[in-house]
Image (tube, rainbow, N blue to C red):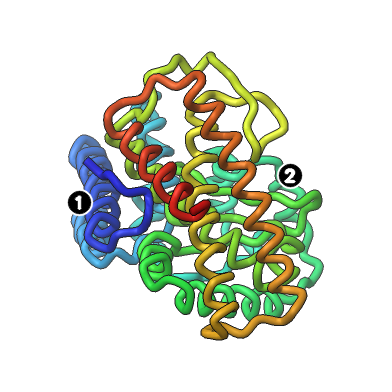
Amino acid sequence: MIEDFLPNKVLADKQSSLMRTFLSTSLLEILDYSSDFLDQKTVKNCREKIELLIGSNKISGFLYAINLQLIKAIKDNNKESISLWFNYINSTNLSCDFNKIILLNEVQDPHKQNLLINTNAIENIDLEREFRDHSQISCETVKKNIDNAFKLVQKVDDSFYNEIQLFIKEILISKKMPPVQGSSTDIFGAIYFNYEVISSNVIDAFERLTHECAHLYLYTIYFEDDLIKNDPSEKYFHALRKDPRPLISVYHACFVLGRMVFLLHKLIEKVQKKDIILFFHDNVHAEALFFKYKQDLEKSIQELDKHAQYTKQGEALIKSIRKMLTNINN
């Protein structure tokens, strides 16, 4: 059982391995099931490629999305779709190192467009319109901001940086307004942002990258444990969403806010000790976010405690968040 909500390299490696094992098992079982109607060279090449990708931990989030499409095709007994996706795996580079930036309006591959639209991986974005819009936006500002944010994370807490390197493979950038950001198990390892919110300043990029990485890590825990026993039909408000959401969404908010409070508090301490130098406006912004998120976290924990029926794992993580809050308040 994972008892601490903060990053831990050994546990992060274990959880990352868990997701890769799930993906490998699913893809290879579907490949075996389909081997009687697929070209045998394609079967051989796909098997070798999948095993190599899984072993390298350089997996594009698109491979998780392809797996979902293959599962759907199996349920529908759609041999044409199964063949299409295994041929695509065979012919496409689905290896991805840490922190690859992709502008959505530059995604010309129709199969990747199909994956993004049909896996519901990205919310609140008119993707078809985005793919049609080829007007230029500068990637340099985004790259610089993200690079500076990663360097800042590493200076503040190396364990957070190591976890980001392990879990975030692709960063998808959208032009759409209003600001959006998110992540999904549908395309695990990829996170997405509106161009404006990730290019505005280093503190926002610092906060948003570590925010989405926290979601990715919690997804891996939720993959093995429900965390709470409440019926998904029960819906409640929490600090990060305006609409009522299932209680697991409130749990996600507590987990993410807990990490942000811890990391921002540590950043502010290092700035005060002059271990880290920030521009005045960035320092003010970091302090404002810290106090806001701490207040939001306290309210969210109260809401969760009022309604949640925790599993042992779920209660252990919330207990460690409460302990962190107590230490900060003292």
Measured along the vertical axis of the image, is residue 137 above or below residue 254?
Answer: below
Which amino acid is tagged 1?
Gln
Viewport quadrant of the N terminus = top left
Q: Relative to 134, is 226 on the left or the right?
A: left
SS at mark 2?
A: loop
Three-letter code, disc 2: Asp
- Residue at 71 percent of width and 78 percent of height: 141
Label for residue 126? 2
In terms of depth relative to the viewer, which is nearer, 35 or 184?
184
Q: Residues within 10 Å of mark 1 (few under 14, many from 20)?
A: few
Task: List x then y, in percent, for residue 252.
Answer: 49, 39
Residue occupying the point 53% across, 77% down: 270
Q: Is residue 53 left or right of residue 102?
A: left
Q: Earlier in the sequence, mark 2 or mark 1?
A: 1
Residue that carries the numbered disc 1 in the rendered image: 40
Q: Quadrant of residue 96?
A: bottom left
**Residue 112 visible in the current orientation:** yes
Q: Is residue 84 visible?
A: no
- In the rendered view, tell whether residue 263 sits above or below residue 242: below
Quarter holding residue 268:
bottom right
Q: Secondary structure at mark 1?
A: helix
How many marks the image carries: the answer is 2
Label 2: few (<14), some (14–19) or many (≥20) C-alpha neighbours in 10 Å: few
Nearest the viewer among 227 and 268 is: 268
* Image x and y of residue 222, in percent: 35, 36
Measured Cα–Cα span from mark 2 to mark 1? 39 Å
Pick whichever, 58 or 329, lies toward us. Answer: 329
